[in-house]
Amino acid sequence: MAFDYDLFVIGGGSGGVRAGRVAAELGVRVAVAEEYRMGGTCVIRGCVPKKLMVFASGYATAAKDARDYGWDVRLGEFDWPKFRAMLHAELDRLEGIYRTNLAKAGAEIFDQRARICGPNSVELADGRSFSARYILVATGGAPYVPEFPGHELAWTSNDVFLMDTLPERVLIVGGGYIACEFACIFNGLGAETSQYYRGAQVLRGFDDEARGHVAELIRGQGIDLHVGTDVERMEQREAGIWVKATDGREGVFDAVVYATGRKPNTTGLGLEEAGVTLGRWGQIEVDEFSQTSAPSIYAVGDVTDRINLTPVAIREGAAFVETVFNDNPTRPDHELVASAVFTQPEYASIGLTEEQARDERPVEIYSAAFRPMQNSFIGKPERVLFKLIVCTNSRKILGCHIISPGAAEMIQMVAVAIKMGATKEDFDRTVAVHPTMAEEIVLMKTPVRTA
Ligand code: NDP
């Protein structure tokens, strides 16, 4: 049977665009449909604008530190409208690059919503329908806000990039990546910032010692962090959004940002009708080659809820093309994926947490928390953390956790060594770069704990 396309990609984010472009470059006839903006969450309302806001918010501390170092620096107001205009110009530029690269590779772009209406059939919002040998679903995820009285007053991360004015009083709800990052961003930009998290400690799933360290940094910056605290109800009042918390606390804020997780975008896509099995959270169930229960339909990225990170979606998209169009079955590698939480300073990690490692085998824990030279010189209390988890028997590094300025840049380098199977002795043989914070990673001689 002749198909209109060899590949129809639904979703123009990191995973979909990579798969579409690479496939088109191989000569495959590709179409990509995107209902919002090309580039997806990462480019349009995630990693990229978030990181630019991290940069913007870091200058207040930099100016204070500069003053402490002897510079005559005076910090004025942050001009959000000016920054926002620059931010959106940059996002437009990046979206243009994504679009151009796809078109250059020969893919056809449809700027509208698409839904599946059979294992080899896709229908666009304007009513046109096309057949395709393969369909790739790469529709990502969307912020999730729980239902409670007043939930409609909540913003999500999507709204932050579009806000007209910078709120003076902000409440962030949640304790994950996005909540901790935005608490630091708003605080750095000068807003009076509070954060409520329902659990006992922020960043559930990360290393306990590192979580405690991040919480200490968040509070040390002046963010009013309350754990074991959730929102019970919210009301719009004259003075702002009135919030009643589960611990009885009441507060009034100009904005309440919910960062309580993301849900896969699978509603109304026609997936189940086409034979695609969905999981408990609505995620698409796939095998190790990203194939769904309908053999002609594949899925990559956050919509599959495996590891929800841009570079992972990109690898999954590329592996899909290798497998399906290049006669080279390729499993995306989900082992030892490093990531960073862009708090200020950052928390970057790879591999096991101390708690995970303890469950599995005898381990040695090497850990050093200290005030780096740059801070101690000006009496700034902020400490950094370097931590290695080592398998007692094989000597391999099972996990590395770094909290410091530039930690995300550092972990990228450490990740290569750990992925190659580096042992503690390999680290020890490496001569330190002095004077740096990172030299600690090759200088920790004695375990602080064994288990
Ligand atoms: P996370 O899953 O990391 O965190 C969600 C937070 O919301 C948790 O603290 C969770 O609490 C809390 N929560 C969930 N449901 C509720 C509820 N009903 N009421 C109150 N609190 C609730 O999600 P994020 O939204 O922060 O990020 C989504 C994903 O995006 C991340 O997992 C990550 O993969 C990716 N991401 C990566 C970034 C990076 O690489 N730097 C940056 C941002 C996002 P509990 O712990 O108790 O479940």
Image: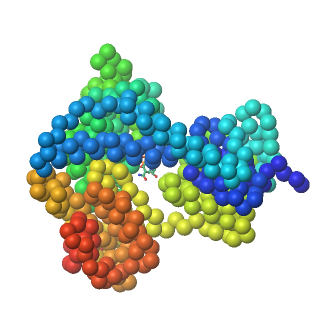
Quarter of the image with the C terminus is bottom left
Q: Looking at this view, is 151 or 41 the one in front?
A: 41
Q: Quadrant of residue 390?
A: bottom left
Question: Horizontal and vertical percent for residue 161?
Answer: 43, 35
In the image, residue 1 above or below residue 272 = below
Question: Horizontal and vertical percent for residue 176?
Answer: 38, 48
In the image, residue 279 above or below residue 415 = above
Quarter of the image with the N terminus is bottom right
User: Residue drawn 28% across and 45% down?
Assistant: 58
In the image, residue 96 above or below residue 80 = below
Question: Horizontal and vertical percent for residue 175?
Answer: 35, 46
User: Residue drawn 29% across and 33% down?
Assistant: 78
Is 123 on the left or on the right of 175, as rendered? right
- In the displayed orientation, state which residue is furthest to the front: 72
User: Residue drawn 75% across and 59% down?
Assistant: 27
Q: Looking at this view, is 402 or 146 the one in front?
A: 402
Is 383 on the left or on the right of 264, as rendered? left
Is 380 on the left or on the right of 110, as rendered? left
Which color scheme is applied?
A: rainbow
